[in-house]
Image (cartoon, grey):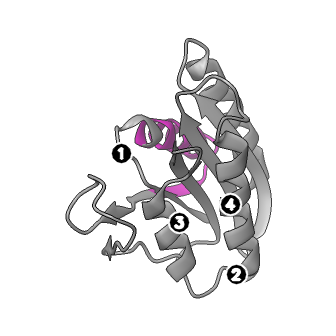
Amino acid sequence: MKIGIIVHSYTGNTYEVAKKLEEKLKDAGKDVEIQRVKKVGGDEPKGKDIEIENPPEVDKYDALIFGSPVHAFSLSLAMKTYLEQISTLRDKKIALFVTKNLRFEWTGGTRAIGQMKKICQSKGGIIMGTGIVIWNKQRDQKINEIAEKFATLF
């Protein structure tokens, strides 16, 4: 099974989680590849009309993990734009995670996961699991929990 981990990472935190997920999944014998979602012109905010630079293809994967930071209590604009432009996720098994700094899940994490879930399901994706990583002292423990959970999903 080929698994694509597709992330938007502004500060590098979300990418760090993706790397740990990749390592855990590879240890479990999975074929895994990470791709990054990048905005044309860089990640600095420049309005709501953005374009994604070389959008990662999803067709070559049997399963997908999408990861994004939470921005302004919502899914990052780059990830939202990327997910909306995917034509289909029909019958793809999908896991989702977000990273955030505010300490409670309800301060944007739950909303961002909900936004990702809604977009993926509207394109035929099957949500297998979700996770929220709060960037605090317990983050490594939470990342390990999510990695363990995601490794059993696919």
Q: Please, what secondary structure does the residue beneath circle 3 have? A: helix
- Rendered view: 27 above or below 125: above
Residue visible at 36% across and 38% down in the picture: 12
Residue 126, percent from left and from top: 79, 69
Give percent across and percent down for residue 134: 60, 27
Q: Nearer the viewer, residue 111 or 88?
A: 111
Disc sitting over residue 80 in the figure: 3
Q: Which residue is mark 4?
A: 115
The residue tagged with tag 4: helix, strand or loop?
A: helix
**Residue at 36% from the left image edge and 45% from the top image edge:** 10
Q: Above or below — where is 64 with respect to 55? A: above
Residue 33: image location, x then y, percent: 46, 58
> Which of the two residues, 70 or 121, is positioned nearer the viewer here?
70
Tell me the amino acid under the disc marked 3: Lys
Q: Earlier in the sequence, mark 1 or mark 3?
A: 1
- Residue furthest out toward the left: 41
How many dots with numbers? 4
Real-space Cα distance between discs 3 and 4? 8 Å
Q: Give the mark, 3 or 4, whose residue is nearer the N terminus.
A: 3
Q: Position of residue 118 (x, y in %)?
A: 74, 68
What is the spatial separation of the Cα atoms under label 4 and label 1, in whole angstroms?
A: 18 Å
Q: Badge 2, how many Cα within 10 Å: few under 14, some, many 20+?
A: some
